Amino acid sequence: MKRLLPPLAVFAVLIGLWWLVVDVSHSAIFPTPLQVATATVELIRDGTLWEHIGASLMRVATGFGLAVLFAVPLGLWMGWVKGAYSTLNPMFQILRPISPIAWIPIAILWFGVGNASPIFLIFISSVFPMVVQTTAGVHTIEKRYLRAAENFGVSRYTLFRQVIIPAVLPQIIVGMRIGLGVAWLVVVAAEMIALRSGLGYLIIDSRNAGNRYDLVISGMIIIGLIGLSLDGLMRLLEGLRVVRWRYAH
């Protein structure tokens, strides 16, 4: 509980400053915290909020899940096989710096306006951090683990299952954490442009439908809270015993 007091105090101060600035400026458009809270209750009561949250989470779960299934095996292969790394790494390093937002016109051209476009954008944005981190994890495995396995004459399958994968898991989790954060950013941006559901659409629709900035700010806060929750879930994985195998003494 003591660890929560400092961040809660900061949030309380920020909310107080927000309320004070709006009150002093007599803004007719920008909402107070109370107005935002009222708008949030309005969304909860009519069920709209849960529909938009569910749509966004579904797209992120699908795109991110596909990225994990693709990136982790590929990263392990690139890290273990020198030829695969030297062949594929230049292509990944060229594509990786491209902003996921730049892929939006291509996604719409290929997949049209629907769920497939944001799922593709989430996949393309989260796959690169996971491939890079997984590959780096294999490259940084301490040689004493591999030599110990060789001394016991273990098979390649056993080596991968009991040595390589446990040793790389911390890096995989880091890549997943980065990828999930980027995926959550991308789905909101994609929903503002190409969809009619989700939290991104909620924000842009509220802006266009009568300047409902109370709903806009409410959507922004909800996006931040869900992002914090997703990051917290990923951090819980870092504490698992199997993930900390590499650092055991």
Image (cartoon, rainbow, N blue to C red):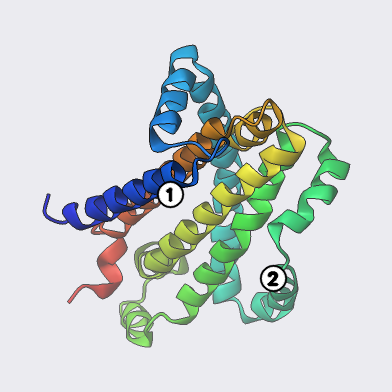
Asked whether the viewer can see residue 165, the reply is no
**Residue at the spot 62% in from the left edge and 44% down from the top edge:** 187
Is residue 55 among the parts visible in the rendering?
Answer: yes
Against 67, residue 31 (above or below) is above
Asked where in the image residue 158 lies, by quadrant, the reply is: bottom left
Tell me which numbered mark, 2 or 1, is placed earlier along the sequence: 1
Q: Residue at the location (75% across, 40% down)? A: 193
| Residue 180: x %, y % from top left | 51, 52
Q: CA distance from mark 2 to mark 1?
A: 39 Å
The residue nearer to you, when weighing 217 against 97, is 217
**Image quarter of residue 95:** bottom right
The residue that appears at 45% across and 32% down in the rendered structure is 36
Q: Position of residue 136 (x, y in %)?
A: 51, 76
Which mark lies nearer to you, 2 or 1?
1
Q: Amino acid at mark 1?
A: Val
At label 2, counting other C-alpha atoms closer than 10 Å, the crowd grade (few under 14, some 14-19, many 20 or more) is few
Pointer 1: residues within 10 angstroms few (<14), some, or many (20+)?
A: few
Quickly name the residue at label 2.
97
Number of numbered discs: 2
- Quickly name the residue at label 1: 21
Q: Is residue 202 left or right of residue 88?
A: left
Which amino acid type is marked by label 2? Pro
Q: Is residue 43 left or right of residue 187?
A: left
